[in-house]
Image (tube, coloured by chain):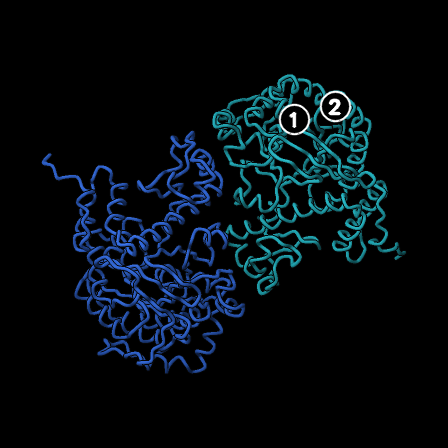
Chain colours: A blue, B cyan
Amino acid sequence: MALTPFCSPPPSLCSSFRSLRRGLFLPLLQAYPYTTSKGAVPMPETALMALRFEVLGRFNRARAAQLTLPHFVCQTPLFMPVGTQGTIKGLATNQLEDIGCQIILGNTYHLALRPTSELIDELGGLHKFMNWPRALLTDSGESSGWKANAPYTRGVYSNPSMCFTLAYFGYSCYINRIGADIIMALDDVVKTTITGPRIEEAMYRTLRWIDRCIAAHKRPYDQNLFGIVQGGLDPVLRDICVRGLVDRNLPGYAIGGLAGGEDKDSFWRVVAQCTAALPEDKPRYVMGVGYPLDIVVCSALGADMYDCVYPTRTARFGTALVPEGVLKLKNNAMAEDTRPIDSTCACMVCKNYSRAYIHSLVSKDAMGSQLLSYHNLYYMMQLSRNLHSSIVRGKFPEFVCNFLQKMFPKGDVPEWVCNAMEVAEIDISSCRARFRDD
Amino acid sequence: MALRFEVLGRFNRARAAQLTLPHFECQTPLFMPVGTQGTIKGLTTNQLEDIGCQIILGNTYHLALRPTSELIDELGGLHKFMNWPRALLTDSGGFQMVSLLHLADITEKGVTFQSPVDGKPMLLTPEESIQIQNRIGADIIMALDDVVKTTITGPRIEEAMYRTLRWIDRCIAAHKRPHDQNLFGIVQGGLDPVLRDICVRGLVDRNLPGYAIGGLAGGEDKDSFWRVVAQCTAALPEDKPRYVMGVGYPLDIVVCSALGADMYDCVYPTRTARFGTALVPEGVLKLKHNAMAKDTRPIDPTCACMVCKNYTRAYIHSLVTKDAMGSQLLSYHNLYYMMQLSRNLHSSIVEGKFPEFVCNFLQKMFPKGDVPEWVCNAMEVAEIDISSCCAPFRKD
């Protein structure tokens, strides 16, 4: 199979490709035929795990656990802020520690481009480079990076085997070099709004690729490779994928392909199905989630970990997260409001700055976004802490009701939430307005 | 007067003092970071306190536009609004107008300009400037002066100097809060010693709480610069603070302090941070430089700031071209550097070690002994012996 011409790759890949041309490339292709695989390649019994997951409390499906990673001991459920470039917009390490961040997500694609994973490795790994003493998770760059943006794949995307080989080779090099506590498999992710055979193709490919990720993984003793469940909104496909990944006996599992525009009713059902089928004793990570309400629902259904750009992104639009929902600081009503963003919040921003002051900044100084990012991340970490402690103390239903009452004071809890809570066996009738015939 | 100025130590013309303001007790010589909008790019209140900032400068022009001085007043003043518990200084707004606005025109009434918000003609008078500053509530407020660039010559300079003296009386009359806000006069007169002398004597007659030396740091040659500072510091009262506006580079601050100045402000440390440049004892360090990509040392191993204790040059290098965090970390370090310089100036004068400090400073910055001639001349007038730092003159 000849190399299809493509745009010149980033310099860091050039040396990789020189070694490819030394004869590794063709044997690599021949070893992995691109037909449906007939069975999983099971992990050896002595598969290494670099984490410990200990459930400390439960309420029905919800669980609070201690997740011990190489760099940090975490409490789940937990939210992971997205740090793209190894930094979270405007916040220094000590501020992130003050906020209570436990795991930060780094985007492999961005880091691989600059400063390059070789440099990060040379300088001792991403933890040392960005001076983050707690845990890190790197994604594969899948949705934001390789396929979407990498110019060298655009020309060859029609040839998926070529695409993966390029991405895979880069992936395996980069992801081990960066050195995060949790690394994500390279999966074939499609939007849930797409229908048709592409979803099935992507699910099976994801299963084939997990074996190649496992084979490529050079550091199973200190980096945890999580598999990602795909399959769109099709329960049959999801089931096949879950079983395939569980057979591989991975340290943890993610539920991927959601949070991409699907309706909420489909969303929670996929989460519910996957959490029911994934092992009890391993962490479950719902990727790309999200809104505080979604996190509460998913936790009720048995998920443990979440990531999303939403809190920091919405901060840059002048929006703060509050128990009632959101507060838009750009609104003129904020100009003379001397209250803090959230009078129940104990964060540095709410203890020091008024809505009026932040309002004066949000339209013209990056400081506005920065203060809102700080508050919003604190809000998410406080939500994480509340989820964990309420489950441990056996007060999870009370917490959920309280949360819903603040967000829906008129009792208009969305139907999808009600349905999900029913499956989670959490009684939220006290938060709901009685149905009226209008 | 709403301040107390107590000299704690001297070395010839240089002095270290305690400047007690309504909101904070400061140590001079001191550098004041510029906070334009009531915030210093990316740094929170507690970070500014950690750095050791004592007084922050707010720009009246920007604050008056948004969120407006009336709102600030209504909400209890700028201190409360931005939650800055220490001292604040506001400028008059005049300088911004002249430097930012194309159609600014100065008449006896005041500064006429086109409002950037809606294009309407507007007028900033001495009365209006003081009224705005009264509403904002800073510890020190600046008189509206008629400032011209030192690179201009001719009768405009004399006109501006006399107008400044006429306007100070209007500022004094308009000032409603002399009990808790200190109105500083500003010495103008370009590079002309005669005009400067007239202005100094005119302002000193008004018995103001403090005095600024204005109109410098605008492109004049360094030799003219230090001579004006030297003349003014010699003529201004001993027992009141002297503020050289728009200064500046660490070297300039050391020289001016040797000549008897106490307070400084400049956008340089934060502005140069946004270009990826860090202030270090040797001068500057350019973090964008490729050599920084693998340099695992901190910006300055002698610096005790949060940035130098936590981040490497390599990491900051990776940020400076593409993430605001790079500029932010550099701003933090640079301001810490300036505050540490302030602390060193104060303590070395108090401890009677000022000449040693100056020599040490110059040796690090000019290791080959090539101290600029203007610095040598200024130090001679300041009676500080820096011969140990200067290479002997050679006939090349």
Figure quadrant of the C terminus of chain A: top left
Respond whether the residues carrying marks 2 and 1 are from the same subunit.
yes
Please, what secondary structure does the residue beneath circle 2 have?
helix
Q: Nearer the viewer, residue A105 or A181?
A: A181
Against A358, residue A373 (above or below) is below
Task: Quickly name the residue at label 2.
Answer: B203
Locate residue A5, reporting x and y percent: 40, 70
Task: Kindly identify which chain the residue marked by label 1 belongs to.
Answer: B
Label 2 or label 1, whichever lies nearer to me, is 1
* Residue occupying image coordinates x 21% and y 66%: A277
Residue count near mark 1 (Cα–Cα under 10 Å), binned few <14, some 14–19, many ≥20: some
Locate residue B123, reporting x and y percent: 57, 21
Q: Amino acid at mark 1?
A: Ala
Left or right: B95 with respect to A162? right
Residue count near mark 2 (Cα–Cα under 10 Å), binned few <14, some 14–19, many ≥20: many
Residues at marks 2 and 1 touching, judged by CB atoms closer than 8 Å: no
How many angstroms separate mark 2 from mark 1 (CA)? Answer: 18 Å
